[in-house]
Amino acid sequence: MTETTGVTVKLDYPVTHDGREINELSFRRMRAKDALIAEAETSEVKAGYLLFANLAGVDVAVVEELDMEDFVKVGEAVAPLLGKSGLDLMKAKAEG
């Protein structure tokens, strides 16, 4: 079994943040401590944004500015990095 340690997603619609254009985002695998990032967040959507931003090492504003097509692409690329436990945590957050 090959373990994915990270993934880089090329954006079809680059975003500008702090005066620089961002054409791609690189995400690392989720760690246990990442589950705490959005623990107090009541919005499921905002919790996902915070997690993605943390895994990419960018400000959450970058994730908020993504075109929806890029956001969906990011979600598909990042899912394997969350592992089964991470995906279960995201589902639990969504359910309640």
Image (spheres, grey):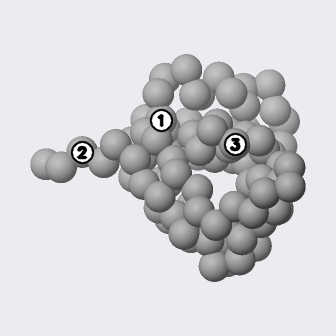
- Relative to the observer, which residue lies in front, 6 or 36? 6
SS class, disc 2: loop
Residue beneath the point at 71% across and 77% down: 13
Q: Amino acid at mark 1?
A: Met
Residue at mark 2 to residue at mark 3: CA–CA distance: 24 Å
**Quarter of the image containing the C terminus?**
top right
Residue beneath the point at 72% across and 31% down: 38
Task: Tell me: 42 left or right of 8.
Answer: right
Q: Amino acid at mark 3?
A: Val
Q: Earlier in the sequence, mark 2 or mark 3?
A: 2
| Residue farthest to the left, as pictured | 1
Q: Amino acid at mark 2?
A: Glu
- Relative to the observer, which residue lies in front, 27 or 33? 27
Instruction: Residue 29 in the image: state x and y as whole percent.
Output: 43, 39
Task: Tell me: 29 left or right of 12.
Answer: left
Instruction: Residue 8 in the image: state x and y as whole percent.
Output: 47, 58
Name which quarter of the figure residue 95 lies in.
top right
Residue at mark 2 to residue at mark 1: CA–CA distance: 12 Å
Circle 3 residues within 10 Å: few <14, some 14–19, many ≥20: some
Residue beneath the point at 13% across and 48% down: 1
Task: Tell me: 77 left or right of 12.
Answer: left
Q: Is residue 58 visible?
A: yes
Instruction: Residue 92 in the image: state x and y as whole percent.
Output: 61, 39
Name which quarter of the figure residue 35 lies in.
top right
Residue beneath the point at 18% across and 49% down: 2
The residue that mark 2 highlights is 3
The residue that mark 1 highlights is 30
Q: Earlier in the sequence, mark 2 or mark 1?
A: 2
Which label belongs to residue 58? 3
Find out whether the residues at labels 2 and 1 contact each other: C-beta distance under 8 Å.
no
Q: Earlier in the sequence, mark 3 or mark 1?
A: 1
Instruction: Residue 91 in the image: state x and y as whole percent.
Output: 58, 46
